[in-house]
Amino acid sequence: MCGLCGICGPAANAETHRRAVHTMSAALEHRGPDDSGDVTLQDFCGSFRRLSIVDLSQSGHQPMQRGPLTLMFNGEIYNHLELRRELVAAGASFRGSSDTEVLLVAYERWGGACLDRLIGMFAIAIWDQRDRSLFLARDRFGVKPLYLATVRSPEQPESIAFASEIGALQAAGLGLEPDQETWAHYLADGAAERGRRTFWRGVERLGAGEMATYKDGALQRSVWYDLEQRLGATEGLDTRSDPEVAEELGELFEETVRLRFRADVPVGINLSGGLDSSLLLALVGRTQGASLEHINAFTFVTGDERYDELPWVQGMLEHTPHPHHTVRLKAEEVPELAASVAAVQREPAGGLPTLAYAKLFESAHERGVKVLLDGQGVDETWAGYDYYRRLVNEQPVTPSAPMLQGSASAPTRPQAMAEELRSLITEAPSGAASTGAAASGPGPCDAGPSDAGPCDAASAPGGSAVLVRQLFDIQHGKLPRALRYNDRVSMRSSVELREPFLDHRLVELGLRQPLERKIKDGVGKALPRELAQRLVPAQVRLAPKRPLQTPQREWLRGQLSEWARGQIEPAVQLGWLDREVVEAEWQRFSQGEGDNAFFIWQWIDLGMLVGRNVA
Protein backbone atom coordinates (compact mmCIF):
# COMPACT_ATOMS: atom_id res chain seq x y z
CA MET A 1 0.00 0.00 0.00
CA CYS A 2 1.62 3.15 -1.17
CA GLY A 3 1.23 6.51 -2.90
CA LEU A 4 2.08 7.39 -6.47
CA CYS A 5 1.99 10.52 -8.59
CA GLY A 6 3.36 11.92 -11.81
CA ILE A 7 2.97 14.01 -14.94
CA CYS A 8 2.88 12.63 -18.46
CA GLY A 9 3.28 14.73 -21.61
CA PRO A 10 5.35 17.76 -22.65
CA ALA A 11 4.82 19.44 -19.26
CA ALA A 12 6.90 16.68 -17.66
CA ASN A 13 10.00 18.13 -19.33
CA ALA A 14 9.69 21.50 -17.61
CA GLU A 15 11.62 22.00 -14.39
CA THR A 16 8.70 23.75 -12.73
CA HIS A 17 6.47 20.73 -13.26
CA ARG A 18 9.15 18.32 -12.12
CA ARG A 19 9.33 20.28 -8.89
CA ALA A 20 5.52 20.09 -8.73
CA VAL A 21 5.76 16.28 -8.83
CA HIS A 22 8.08 16.38 -5.80
CA THR A 23 5.53 18.58 -4.05
CA MET A 24 2.80 16.06 -4.87
CA SER A 25 4.94 13.25 -3.54
CA ALA A 26 5.55 15.06 -0.25
CA ALA A 27 1.77 15.33 0.17
CA LEU A 28 1.58 11.52 -0.06
CA GLU A 29 4.25 10.72 2.52
CA HIS A 30 1.69 9.29 4.97
CA ARG A 31 0.81 6.64 2.38
CA GLY A 32 4.40 5.43 2.19
CA PRO A 33 6.87 6.54 4.85
CA ASP A 34 9.27 3.60 4.43
CA ASP A 35 10.90 4.46 1.12
CA SER A 36 10.61 6.88 -1.79
CA GLY A 37 11.78 7.03 -5.36
CA ASP A 38 11.64 9.25 -8.42
CA VAL A 39 11.97 8.81 -12.15
CA THR A 40 12.53 11.49 -14.80
CA LEU A 41 12.34 10.58 -18.48
CA GLN A 42 11.43 12.34 -21.69
CA ASP A 43 7.72 13.28 -21.37
CA PHE A 44 7.34 11.46 -18.05
CA CYS A 45 8.12 12.36 -14.45
CA GLY A 46 6.95 10.21 -11.54
CA SER A 47 7.40 9.81 -7.80
CA PHE A 48 6.54 7.04 -5.39
CA ARG A 49 6.08 6.63 -1.63
CA ARG A 50 6.37 3.07 -0.33
CA LEU A 51 4.74 1.36 2.61
CA SER A 52 6.78 -1.85 2.70
CA ILE A 53 4.59 -4.94 3.18
CA VAL A 54 5.92 -7.70 0.89
CA ASP A 55 9.69 -8.11 0.36
CA LEU A 56 10.98 -5.34 2.60
CA SER A 57 14.30 -5.15 0.77
CA GLN A 58 15.32 -2.68 -1.92
CA SER A 59 14.37 -5.24 -4.57
CA GLY A 60 10.82 -3.97 -4.07
CA HIS A 61 11.83 -0.32 -4.57
CA GLN A 62 9.66 1.80 -6.87
CA PRO A 63 9.49 3.21 -9.47
CA MET A 64 10.61 -0.16 -10.82
CA GLN A 65 12.17 -0.28 -14.27
CA ARG A 66 12.55 -3.25 -16.59
CA GLY A 67 13.73 -2.48 -20.07
CA PRO A 68 11.54 0.28 -21.53
CA LEU A 69 8.87 -0.13 -18.85
CA THR A 70 8.61 1.85 -15.62
CA LEU A 71 6.04 0.73 -13.04
CA MET A 72 4.49 2.49 -10.04
CA PHE A 73 1.95 0.37 -8.21
CA ASN A 74 -0.20 0.95 -5.11
CA GLY A 75 -1.83 -2.10 -3.54
CA GLU A 76 -1.22 -5.82 -3.30
CA ILE A 77 -1.31 -8.75 -5.72
CA TYR A 78 -2.32 -11.56 -3.39
CA ASN A 79 -1.72 -14.38 -5.88
CA HIS A 80 1.77 -13.16 -6.78
CA LEU A 81 3.38 -16.48 -5.78
CA GLU A 82 1.19 -18.45 -8.17
CA LEU A 83 1.75 -15.93 -10.98
CA ARG A 84 5.51 -16.01 -10.34
CA ARG A 85 5.56 -19.80 -10.78
CA GLU A 86 3.63 -19.48 -14.04
CA LEU A 87 5.96 -16.80 -15.35
CA VAL A 88 9.10 -18.69 -14.32
CA ALA A 89 7.78 -21.77 -16.14
CA ALA A 90 7.44 -19.55 -19.21
CA GLY A 91 11.08 -18.48 -18.94
CA ALA A 92 10.91 -15.26 -16.88
CA SER A 93 13.58 -14.40 -14.32
CA PHE A 94 13.27 -12.30 -11.14
CA ARG A 95 15.67 -10.28 -8.98
CA GLY A 96 13.59 -10.25 -5.77
CA SER A 97 10.42 -11.62 -4.19
CA SER A 98 8.06 -8.63 -4.39
CA ASP A 99 4.61 -8.70 -5.93
CA THR A 100 5.60 -5.47 -7.71
CA GLU A 101 8.15 -7.28 -9.84
CA VAL A 102 5.63 -10.04 -10.60
CA LEU A 103 3.17 -7.41 -11.81
CA LEU A 104 5.78 -5.76 -14.02
CA VAL A 105 6.84 -9.06 -15.60
CA ALA A 106 3.19 -10.05 -16.06
CA TYR A 107 2.49 -6.79 -17.89
CA GLU A 108 5.63 -7.25 -19.97
CA ARG A 109 4.37 -10.69 -21.04
CA TRP A 110 0.60 -10.20 -21.31
CA GLY A 111 0.05 -6.45 -21.53
CA GLY A 112 -3.24 -5.14 -20.19
CA ALA A 113 -4.67 -8.67 -20.35
CA CYS A 114 -2.65 -9.44 -17.22
CA LEU A 115 -5.30 -7.64 -15.14
CA ASP A 116 -7.72 -10.56 -15.50
CA ARG A 117 -5.15 -12.82 -13.86
CA LEU A 118 -4.70 -10.65 -10.77
CA ILE A 119 -6.33 -11.31 -7.41
CA GLY A 120 -5.80 -8.15 -5.46
CA MET A 121 -6.35 -4.45 -4.98
CA PHE A 122 -4.34 -2.05 -7.07
CA ALA A 123 -3.84 1.25 -8.82
CA ILE A 124 -1.22 0.96 -11.55
CA ALA A 125 0.78 3.39 -13.67
CA ILE A 126 3.18 1.99 -16.31
CA TRP A 127 5.21 4.21 -18.60
CA ASP A 128 6.41 2.67 -21.88
CA GLN A 129 9.38 4.61 -23.21
CA ARG A 130 9.13 2.97 -26.65
CA ASP A 131 6.00 4.83 -27.71
CA ARG A 132 5.86 7.31 -24.81
CA SER A 133 2.53 5.99 -23.56
CA LEU A 134 1.16 5.75 -20.04
CA PHE A 135 -0.99 2.79 -18.98
CA LEU A 136 -3.28 3.28 -15.96
CA ALA A 137 -5.58 0.77 -14.24
CA ARG A 138 -7.61 0.25 -11.07
CA ASP A 139 -8.79 -2.94 -9.42
CA ARG A 140 -12.23 -4.42 -10.00
CA PHE A 141 -14.10 -2.63 -7.19
CA GLY A 142 -11.89 0.44 -6.84
CA VAL A 143 -10.33 -0.40 -3.47
CA LYS A 144 -7.25 1.62 -4.40
CA PRO A 145 -7.68 5.18 -5.71
CA LEU A 146 -6.29 7.04 -8.70
CA TYR A 147 -7.11 10.64 -9.67
CA LEU A 148 -6.41 12.55 -12.88
CA ALA A 149 -6.09 16.23 -13.79
CA THR A 150 -5.14 18.14 -16.91
CA VAL A 151 -1.92 20.17 -16.85
CA ARG A 152 -2.00 23.26 -19.03
CA SER A 153 1.12 25.25 -19.89
CA PRO A 154 1.61 28.31 -22.13
CA GLU A 155 2.63 27.40 -25.67
CA GLN A 156 2.55 23.66 -24.92
CA PRO A 157 0.03 20.89 -25.62
CA GLU A 158 -1.94 19.68 -22.62
CA SER A 159 -0.43 17.04 -20.35
CA ILE A 160 -1.93 14.85 -17.64
CA ALA A 161 -1.18 14.55 -13.92
CA PHE A 162 -2.13 11.58 -11.77
CA ALA A 163 -2.00 10.86 -8.05
CA SER A 164 -3.31 8.54 -5.35
CA GLU A 165 -5.10 11.38 -3.56
CA ILE A 166 -6.80 14.62 -4.54
CA GLY A 167 -4.69 16.44 -1.96
CA ALA A 168 -1.52 15.64 -3.90
CA LEU A 169 -2.90 17.20 -7.07
CA GLN A 170 -4.04 20.24 -5.10
CA ALA A 171 -0.58 20.59 -3.56
CA ALA A 172 0.64 21.15 -7.14
CA GLY A 173 -2.02 23.79 -7.74
CA LEU A 174 -4.46 21.53 -9.64
CA GLY A 175 -8.16 21.14 -8.91
CA LEU A 176 -8.44 23.91 -6.36
CA GLU A 177 -11.90 25.13 -7.38
CA PRO A 178 -14.89 23.31 -5.85
CA ASP A 179 -17.34 21.79 -8.32
CA GLN A 180 -20.59 23.51 -7.39
CA GLU A 181 -22.72 21.19 -9.48
CA THR A 182 -21.36 18.11 -7.70
CA TRP A 183 -21.94 19.76 -4.34
CA ALA A 184 -25.49 20.73 -5.37
CA HIS A 185 -26.37 17.15 -6.25
CA TYR A 186 -24.74 15.84 -3.07
CA LEU A 187 -26.64 18.25 -0.84
CA ALA A 188 -29.86 17.26 -2.60
CA ASP A 189 -29.53 13.49 -2.78
CA GLY A 190 -26.60 12.61 -0.52
CA ALA A 191 -24.67 10.59 -3.11
CA ALA A 192 -21.01 11.07 -2.21
CA GLU A 193 -19.80 9.11 -5.25
CA ARG A 194 -20.71 10.43 -8.70
CA GLY A 195 -18.89 8.18 -11.13
CA ARG A 196 -15.73 9.77 -12.46
CA ARG A 197 -16.61 13.21 -11.09
CA THR A 198 -15.17 14.50 -7.84
CA PHE A 199 -16.05 17.50 -5.71
CA TRP A 200 -13.30 19.56 -7.39
CA ARG A 201 -13.36 21.01 -10.90
CA GLY A 202 -10.77 19.53 -13.19
CA VAL A 203 -10.15 16.42 -11.06
CA GLU A 204 -11.55 13.07 -12.16
CA ARG A 205 -11.10 9.58 -10.82
CA LEU A 206 -10.18 6.57 -12.89
CA GLY A 207 -13.16 4.29 -12.44
CA ALA A 208 -13.24 0.96 -10.66
CA GLY A 209 -12.42 -1.83 -13.11
CA GLU A 210 -11.25 0.76 -15.63
CA MET A 211 -8.00 1.12 -17.53
CA ALA A 212 -6.73 3.95 -19.68
CA THR A 213 -3.89 4.80 -22.03
CA TYR A 214 -2.52 8.32 -22.39
CA LYS A 215 -0.58 8.91 -25.58
CA ASP A 216 0.04 11.95 -27.78
CA GLY A 217 -2.15 14.14 -25.61
CA ALA A 218 -5.20 11.85 -25.71
CA LEU A 219 -6.64 9.72 -22.92
CA GLN A 220 -8.42 6.54 -24.05
CA ARG A 221 -10.48 4.81 -21.35
CA SER A 222 -12.00 1.33 -21.37
CA VAL A 223 -13.60 -1.03 -18.87
CA TRP A 224 -11.60 -4.19 -18.26
CA TYR A 225 -13.89 -5.60 -15.55
CA ASP A 226 -17.68 -5.37 -15.96
CA LEU A 227 -19.50 -7.01 -13.05
CA GLU A 228 -22.88 -7.19 -14.78
CA GLN A 229 -21.27 -8.69 -17.87
CA ARG A 230 -19.52 -11.27 -15.69
CA LEU A 231 -22.81 -12.25 -14.11
CA GLY A 232 -24.59 -12.34 -17.47
CA ALA A 233 -21.95 -14.68 -18.83
CA THR A 234 -23.19 -17.36 -16.40
CA GLU A 235 -26.64 -17.38 -18.06
CA GLY A 236 -28.66 -16.68 -14.94
CA LEU A 237 -28.67 -17.72 -11.31
CA ASP A 238 -26.82 -20.58 -9.66
CA THR A 239 -28.96 -23.73 -9.93
CA ARG A 240 -26.70 -26.03 -7.93
CA SER A 241 -27.80 -27.54 -4.65
CA ASP A 242 -27.36 -25.72 -1.34
CA PRO A 243 -24.63 -28.14 -0.15
CA GLU A 244 -22.63 -27.68 -3.37
CA VAL A 245 -22.73 -23.89 -3.12
CA ALA A 246 -22.01 -23.94 0.61
CA GLU A 247 -18.94 -26.10 0.04
CA GLU A 248 -17.56 -23.73 -2.61
CA LEU A 249 -18.36 -20.71 -0.45
CA GLY A 250 -16.56 -22.19 2.55
CA GLU A 251 -13.49 -23.03 0.49
CA LEU A 252 -13.40 -19.57 -1.07
CA PHE A 253 -13.80 -17.85 2.29
CA GLU A 254 -10.80 -19.74 3.63
CA GLU A 255 -8.68 -19.10 0.56
CA THR A 256 -9.40 -15.36 0.46
CA VAL A 257 -8.43 -14.95 4.13
CA ARG A 258 -5.33 -17.10 3.72
CA LEU A 259 -4.17 -15.06 0.73
CA ARG A 260 -4.59 -11.78 2.61
CA PHE A 261 -2.23 -12.92 5.33
CA ARG A 262 0.62 -12.92 2.83
CA ALA A 263 2.83 -10.23 4.28
CA ASP A 264 6.29 -9.74 5.75
CA VAL A 265 4.93 -7.48 8.52
CA PRO A 266 2.42 -7.97 11.37
CA VAL A 267 -1.21 -8.48 10.31
CA GLY A 268 -4.21 -7.75 12.55
CA ILE A 269 -8.01 -7.75 12.31
CA ASN A 270 -10.80 -5.22 12.89
CA LEU A 271 -13.74 -6.63 14.83
CA SER A 272 -17.28 -5.52 15.61
CA GLY A 273 -19.83 -7.73 17.28
CA GLY A 274 -21.71 -8.93 14.21
CA LEU A 275 -21.82 -11.81 11.79
CA ASP A 276 -19.16 -10.56 9.38
CA SER A 277 -16.58 -10.11 12.14
CA SER A 278 -17.38 -13.47 13.73
CA LEU A 279 -16.97 -15.14 10.35
CA LEU A 280 -13.67 -13.35 9.75
CA LEU A 281 -12.41 -14.32 13.20
CA ALA A 282 -13.36 -17.97 12.67
CA LEU A 283 -11.64 -18.05 9.27
CA VAL A 284 -8.49 -16.50 10.72
CA GLY A 285 -8.51 -19.25 13.33
CA ARG A 286 -8.85 -21.96 10.68
CA THR A 287 -6.18 -20.58 8.37
CA GLN A 288 -3.51 -19.21 10.72
CA GLY A 289 -3.26 -22.00 13.27
CA ALA A 290 -0.62 -21.59 15.96
CA SER A 291 0.17 -17.94 15.20
CA LEU A 292 -3.05 -16.49 16.62
CA GLU A 293 -1.37 -14.98 19.69
CA HIS A 294 0.53 -12.69 17.31
CA ILE A 295 -2.59 -11.48 15.49
CA ASN A 296 -3.93 -8.37 17.22
CA ALA A 297 -7.64 -7.54 17.16
CA PHE A 298 -8.97 -3.96 17.29
CA THR A 299 -12.43 -2.62 18.12
CA PHE A 300 -13.59 0.99 18.30
CA VAL A 301 -16.05 2.20 20.95
CA THR A 302 -17.49 5.52 22.08
CA GLY A 303 -18.37 4.69 25.68
CA ASP A 304 -22.10 4.58 24.87
CA GLU A 305 -23.59 1.12 25.45
CA ARG A 306 -26.47 1.87 23.07
CA TYR A 307 -23.99 1.69 20.21
CA ASP A 308 -20.84 -0.08 21.38
CA GLU A 309 -20.56 -3.79 20.58
CA LEU A 310 -17.70 -4.52 22.95
CA PRO A 311 -19.50 -7.20 25.03
CA TRP A 312 -20.14 -9.28 21.91
CA VAL A 313 -16.57 -8.82 20.66
CA GLN A 314 -15.21 -9.92 24.04
CA GLY A 315 -17.45 -12.96 23.85
CA MET A 316 -16.04 -13.85 20.44
CA LEU A 317 -12.47 -13.52 21.67
CA GLU A 318 -12.96 -15.19 25.05
CA HIS A 319 -11.63 -18.56 23.94
CA THR A 320 -8.93 -17.29 21.57
CA PRO A 321 -5.35 -16.09 22.23
CA HIS A 322 -5.73 -12.88 20.18
CA PRO A 323 -4.50 -9.73 21.95
CA HIS A 324 -7.44 -7.31 21.91
CA HIS A 325 -7.25 -3.51 21.84
CA THR A 326 -10.28 -1.33 22.52
CA VAL A 327 -9.98 2.09 20.93
CA ARG A 328 -12.30 4.74 22.34
CA LEU A 329 -13.37 7.86 20.47
CA LYS A 330 -14.17 10.76 22.80
CA ALA A 331 -16.29 13.77 21.92
CA GLU A 332 -13.51 16.21 22.77
CA GLU A 333 -11.25 14.53 20.18
CA VAL A 334 -13.67 15.08 17.30
CA PRO A 335 -12.75 18.67 16.27
CA GLU A 336 -9.06 17.99 15.73
CA LEU A 337 -9.65 14.52 14.29
CA ALA A 338 -12.34 15.75 11.88
CA ALA A 339 -9.99 18.42 10.50
CA SER A 340 -7.20 15.87 10.05
CA VAL A 341 -9.46 13.36 8.28
CA ALA A 342 -10.94 16.06 6.03
CA ALA A 343 -7.40 16.99 4.96
CA VAL A 344 -6.79 13.50 3.53
CA GLN A 345 -10.33 12.82 2.29
CA ARG A 346 -10.83 16.14 0.43
CA GLU A 347 -14.41 14.96 -0.19
CA PRO A 348 -17.34 14.31 2.21
CA ALA A 349 -16.09 11.93 4.86
CA GLY A 350 -19.01 10.18 6.53
CA GLY A 351 -19.19 11.54 10.08
CA LEU A 352 -18.29 9.97 13.41
CA PRO A 353 -18.02 6.33 12.24
CA THR A 354 -15.23 7.38 9.86
CA LEU A 355 -13.49 9.29 12.64
CA ALA A 356 -13.75 6.34 15.01
CA TYR A 357 -12.27 4.10 12.34
CA ALA A 358 -9.47 6.62 11.82
CA LYS A 359 -8.58 6.41 15.49
CA LEU A 360 -8.54 2.61 15.30
CA PHE A 361 -5.89 2.77 12.56
CA GLU A 362 -3.88 5.20 14.68
CA SER A 363 -3.86 2.58 17.43
CA ALA A 364 -2.75 -0.16 15.04
CA HIS A 365 0.11 2.03 13.79
CA GLU A 366 1.23 2.79 17.35
CA ARG A 367 1.41 -0.96 18.04
CA GLY A 368 3.43 -1.73 14.93
CA VAL A 369 0.59 -3.48 13.09
CA LYS A 370 0.98 -2.52 9.44
CA VAL A 371 -1.87 -4.54 7.92
CA LEU A 372 -5.47 -4.94 9.08
CA LEU A 373 -8.29 -7.09 7.71
CA ASP A 374 -12.00 -6.30 8.02
CA GLY A 375 -15.32 -7.78 6.91
CA GLN A 376 -16.42 -5.21 4.31
CA GLY A 377 -18.49 -6.59 1.45
CA VAL A 378 -20.73 -9.29 2.93
CA ASP A 379 -23.74 -7.00 3.37
CA GLU A 380 -23.67 -5.87 -0.25
CA THR A 381 -22.97 -9.33 -1.68
CA TRP A 382 -25.46 -11.27 0.45
CA ALA A 383 -28.24 -8.66 0.95
CA GLY A 384 -27.55 -7.84 4.58
CA TYR A 385 -29.03 -4.33 4.76
CA ASP A 386 -32.59 -3.92 6.01
CA TYR A 387 -33.85 -2.18 2.87
CA TYR A 388 -33.03 -5.25 0.76
CA ARG A 389 -35.65 -7.14 2.73
CA ARG A 390 -38.25 -4.49 1.92
CA LEU A 391 -37.57 -5.06 -1.76
CA VAL A 392 -38.33 -8.78 -1.47
CA ASN A 393 -42.05 -8.08 -1.58
CA GLU A 394 -41.55 -5.20 -4.02
CA GLN A 395 -42.39 -2.67 -1.33
CA PRO A 396 -41.79 0.85 -2.65
CA VAL A 397 -38.87 2.81 -1.28
CA THR A 398 -40.52 5.98 0.00
CA PRO A 399 -39.53 8.81 2.34
CA SER A 400 -40.99 6.73 5.17
CA ALA A 401 -38.77 3.81 4.23
CA PRO A 402 -35.55 5.34 2.92
CA MET A 403 -32.38 3.53 1.97
CA LEU A 404 -30.43 5.09 4.81
CA GLN A 405 -29.82 2.01 6.91
CA GLY A 406 -31.92 2.08 10.07
CA SER A 407 -33.46 5.51 9.44
CA ALA A 408 -37.06 6.49 8.76
CA SER A 409 -36.59 10.23 8.31
CA ALA A 410 -35.27 12.24 5.37
CA PRO A 411 -31.45 12.31 5.39
CA THR A 412 -30.97 15.48 3.30
CA ARG A 413 -32.38 19.00 3.26
CA PRO A 414 -32.45 20.17 -0.38
CA GLN A 415 -34.63 23.10 0.65
CA ALA A 416 -31.68 24.54 2.61
CA MET A 417 -29.70 25.18 -0.56
CA ALA A 418 -29.58 28.72 -1.93
CA GLU A 419 -31.54 29.12 -5.14
CA GLU A 420 -28.40 29.69 -7.21
CA LEU A 421 -26.91 26.38 -6.09
CA ARG A 422 -30.21 24.51 -6.46
CA SER A 423 -30.47 25.72 -10.07
CA LEU A 424 -27.36 23.67 -10.92
CA ILE A 425 -29.22 20.38 -10.38
CA THR A 426 -29.80 19.06 -13.86
CA GLU A 427 -32.37 16.43 -12.93
CA ALA A 428 -34.89 15.88 -10.15
CA PRO A 429 -33.07 15.16 -6.89
CA SER A 430 -33.29 11.51 -5.96
CA GLY A 431 -32.85 11.90 -2.23
CA ALA A 432 -35.31 12.63 0.53
CA ALA A 433 -37.97 14.08 -1.72
CA SER A 434 -38.31 10.97 -3.83
CA THR A 435 -36.59 7.67 -3.03
CA GLY A 436 -34.88 8.70 0.19
CA ALA A 437 -31.75 6.99 -1.03
CA ALA A 438 -29.47 9.72 0.16
CA ALA A 439 -26.95 7.83 2.21
CA SER A 440 -26.15 5.31 -0.47
CA GLY A 441 -26.73 7.40 -3.55
CA PRO A 442 -29.67 7.91 -5.85
CA GLY A 443 -32.16 5.12 -6.31
CA PRO A 444 -31.28 2.84 -9.23
CA CYS A 445 -33.87 4.40 -11.52
CA ASP A 446 -33.27 7.97 -10.38
CA ALA A 447 -29.52 8.02 -10.94
CA GLY A 448 -28.00 11.06 -12.53
CA PRO A 449 -25.74 10.80 -15.58
CA SER A 450 -22.64 10.41 -13.42
CA ASP A 451 -24.20 7.73 -11.24
CA ALA A 452 -26.04 5.76 -13.88
CA GLY A 453 -26.73 2.25 -12.67
CA PRO A 454 -29.05 -0.60 -13.61
CA CYS A 455 -32.62 0.67 -13.82
CA ASP A 456 -34.62 -2.37 -14.81
CA ALA A 457 -34.90 -5.48 -12.67
CA ALA A 458 -35.31 -7.47 -15.85
CA SER A 459 -31.75 -6.52 -16.84
CA ALA A 460 -30.33 -8.45 -13.89
CA PRO A 461 -29.99 -12.24 -13.74
CA GLY A 462 -33.24 -13.59 -12.34
CA GLY A 463 -34.96 -10.20 -12.71
CA SER A 464 -34.57 -9.54 -8.99
CA ALA A 465 -35.15 -6.05 -7.61
CA VAL A 466 -32.83 -7.03 -4.75
CA LEU A 467 -30.06 -7.92 -7.18
CA VAL A 468 -30.53 -4.65 -9.05
CA ARG A 469 -30.05 -2.77 -5.79
CA GLN A 470 -27.04 -4.90 -4.86
CA LEU A 471 -25.38 -4.11 -8.18
CA PHE A 472 -26.06 -0.43 -7.67
CA ASP A 473 -24.65 -0.45 -4.13
CA ILE A 474 -21.49 -2.28 -5.25
CA GLN A 475 -20.84 -0.24 -8.37
CA HIS A 476 -22.18 3.23 -7.58
CA GLY A 477 -23.38 3.64 -4.00
CA LYS A 478 -22.47 2.26 -0.61
CA LEU A 479 -19.35 0.31 -1.52
CA PRO A 480 -17.40 2.96 -3.48
CA ARG A 481 -18.14 5.46 -0.72
CA ALA A 482 -17.02 3.09 2.06
CA LEU A 483 -13.87 2.11 0.19
CA ARG A 484 -12.88 5.76 -0.24
CA TYR A 485 -13.48 6.50 3.44
CA ASN A 486 -11.52 3.43 4.50
CA ASP A 487 -8.56 3.92 2.19
CA ARG A 488 -7.95 7.47 3.36
CA VAL A 489 -8.30 6.87 7.10
CA SER A 490 -6.13 3.74 7.01
CA MET A 491 -3.40 5.32 4.90
CA ARG A 492 -3.52 8.46 7.02
CA SER A 493 -1.89 6.27 9.69
CA SER A 494 0.30 4.32 7.23
CA VAL A 495 -1.71 1.12 7.71
CA GLU A 496 -2.83 -1.15 4.88
CA LEU A 497 -6.46 -2.30 4.98
CA ARG A 498 -7.30 -5.57 3.24
CA GLU A 499 -10.85 -6.69 2.40
CA PRO A 500 -10.93 -10.51 2.02
CA PHE A 501 -14.70 -10.64 1.45
CA LEU A 502 -14.35 -8.34 -1.57
CA ASP A 503 -12.39 -10.95 -3.49
CA HIS A 504 -14.10 -10.82 -6.89
CA ARG A 505 -14.70 -14.56 -6.88
CA LEU A 506 -16.68 -14.28 -3.65
CA VAL A 507 -18.66 -11.30 -4.90
CA GLU A 508 -19.57 -13.01 -8.17
CA LEU A 509 -20.53 -16.23 -6.38
CA GLY A 510 -22.79 -14.37 -3.95
CA LEU A 511 -24.55 -12.25 -6.55
CA ARG A 512 -25.33 -15.32 -8.67
CA GLN A 513 -27.31 -16.96 -5.88
CA PRO A 514 -31.12 -17.07 -5.89
CA LEU A 515 -32.88 -14.85 -3.39
CA GLU A 516 -33.61 -17.63 -0.89
CA ARG A 517 -29.87 -18.09 -0.29
CA LYS A 518 -29.55 -14.40 0.52
CA ILE A 519 -32.70 -13.68 2.52
CA LYS A 520 -34.46 -16.39 4.52
CA ASP A 521 -37.21 -15.92 7.09
CA GLY A 522 -36.80 -12.16 6.79
CA VAL A 523 -33.07 -12.25 7.63
CA GLY A 524 -30.28 -11.35 5.19
CA LYS A 525 -26.93 -13.06 4.54
CA ALA A 526 -28.66 -16.44 4.80
CA LEU A 527 -25.96 -18.75 3.42
CA PRO A 528 -23.00 -17.03 5.14
CA ARG A 529 -25.06 -17.11 8.34
CA GLU A 530 -25.50 -20.88 8.03
CA LEU A 531 -21.79 -21.26 7.36
CA ALA A 532 -20.92 -19.13 10.38
CA GLN A 533 -23.09 -21.35 12.59
CA ARG A 534 -20.80 -24.24 11.69
CA LEU A 535 -17.57 -22.28 12.15
CA VAL A 536 -18.30 -20.04 15.14
CA PRO A 537 -18.34 -21.68 18.60
CA ALA A 538 -21.90 -22.27 19.84
CA GLN A 539 -21.34 -20.22 23.01
CA VAL A 540 -20.56 -17.06 21.01
CA ARG A 541 -23.52 -14.67 20.83
CA LEU A 542 -23.58 -12.12 18.04
CA ALA A 543 -24.65 -8.53 18.42
CA PRO A 544 -28.00 -7.73 16.83
CA LYS A 545 -27.76 -6.01 13.46
CA ARG A 546 -27.54 -2.30 14.25
CA PRO A 547 -27.10 0.38 11.60
CA LEU A 548 -25.57 3.02 13.86
CA GLN A 549 -22.26 2.54 15.63
CA THR A 550 -21.71 5.97 17.13
CA PRO A 551 -23.78 8.52 19.08
CA GLN A 552 -23.46 11.07 16.27
CA ARG A 553 -26.93 12.57 16.82
CA GLU A 554 -26.48 12.84 20.56
CA TRP A 555 -23.03 14.42 20.40
CA LEU A 556 -24.01 16.94 17.72
CA ARG A 557 -27.05 17.93 19.79
CA GLY A 558 -24.98 18.07 22.97
CA GLN A 559 -21.28 18.49 23.64
CA LEU A 560 -20.38 19.05 19.98
CA SER A 561 -23.19 21.48 19.25
CA GLU A 562 -21.08 24.63 19.42
CA TRP A 563 -18.30 23.08 17.36
CA ALA A 564 -20.78 21.90 14.70
CA ARG A 565 -22.30 25.35 14.37
CA GLY A 566 -18.81 26.78 14.00
CA GLN A 567 -18.13 24.46 11.06
CA ILE A 568 -21.47 25.14 9.40
CA GLU A 569 -21.10 28.94 9.54
CA PRO A 570 -18.41 29.11 6.79
CA ALA A 571 -20.71 26.99 4.61
CA VAL A 572 -23.51 29.50 5.10
CA GLN A 573 -21.15 32.40 4.41
CA LEU A 574 -20.30 30.84 1.05
CA GLY A 575 -23.79 31.76 -0.08
CA TRP A 576 -24.54 28.14 -0.97
CA LEU A 577 -27.03 27.65 1.89
CA ASP A 578 -30.05 29.67 2.95
CA ARG A 579 -29.32 30.96 6.45
CA GLU A 580 -32.96 31.08 7.56
CA VAL A 581 -33.66 27.50 6.47
CA VAL A 582 -30.41 26.24 8.03
CA GLU A 583 -31.28 27.94 11.33
CA ALA A 584 -34.78 26.45 11.32
CA GLU A 585 -33.51 22.94 10.51
CA TRP A 586 -30.82 23.22 13.17
CA GLN A 587 -33.39 24.18 15.77
CA ARG A 588 -35.59 21.22 14.87
CA PHE A 589 -32.60 18.89 14.97
CA SER A 590 -31.40 20.30 18.31
CA GLN A 591 -34.84 19.73 19.82
CA GLY A 592 -34.68 16.03 18.94
CA GLU A 593 -36.58 15.91 15.66
CA GLY A 594 -35.48 13.22 13.21
CA ASP A 595 -33.55 9.99 13.64
CA ASN A 596 -30.38 10.83 11.71
CA ALA A 597 -27.80 13.62 11.52
CA PHE A 598 -26.74 12.98 7.93
CA PHE A 599 -27.66 16.46 6.67
CA ILE A 600 -25.89 18.12 9.61
CA TRP A 601 -22.64 16.37 8.74
CA GLN A 602 -23.12 17.30 5.08
CA TRP A 603 -23.06 20.96 6.13
CA ILE A 604 -20.06 20.35 8.41
CA ASP A 605 -18.16 18.78 5.49
CA LEU A 606 -19.09 21.69 3.24
CA GLY A 607 -17.80 24.14 5.81
CA MET A 608 -14.53 22.28 6.43
CA LEU A 609 -13.73 21.40 2.82
CA VAL A 610 -14.92 24.51 0.98
CA GLY A 611 -16.09 27.25 3.32
CA ARG A 612 -12.87 27.68 5.28
CA ASN A 613 -10.73 27.47 2.13
CA VAL A 614 -12.78 30.02 0.20
CA ALA A 615 -13.61 32.45 3.01
Image: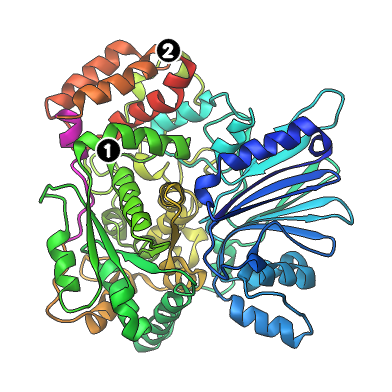
Q: Please state which of residues 210 and 392 is positioned toward the viewer in this rendering.
A: 210
- Mark on residue 452? none
Q: In the image, residue 547 lies at what x, y percent?
A: 23, 51
**Count of residue discs:** 2
Give how far across and how far down residue 316 sits, in percent: 18, 72
Residue 155: percent from the left, percent from the top? Answer: 87, 24
Q: In this view, does 492 lie to the left or right of 219?
A: left
Examine the image and state in which quarter residue 560 appears. Answer: top left
Assess whether residue 532 is covered by the magenta stretch: no
**Residue assigned mark 1:** 399
Q: In this view, does 559 lie above or below 307?
A: above
> In what element is the residue under mark 1?
loop
Residue 401 lies, with reference to residue 286, above or below; the image says: above
Assign the C terminus to one quadrant of the image. Answer: top left
Instruction: Give the residue drawn at x 32%, y 26%.
Output: 413
User: Which range is magenta?
Assistant: 544-558
Identify the residue under disc 2: 575
Query: Mark 1: which amino acid?
Result: Pro
Is residue 549 within the magenta segment? yes
Is the magenta region chiefly helix, strand or loop? loop
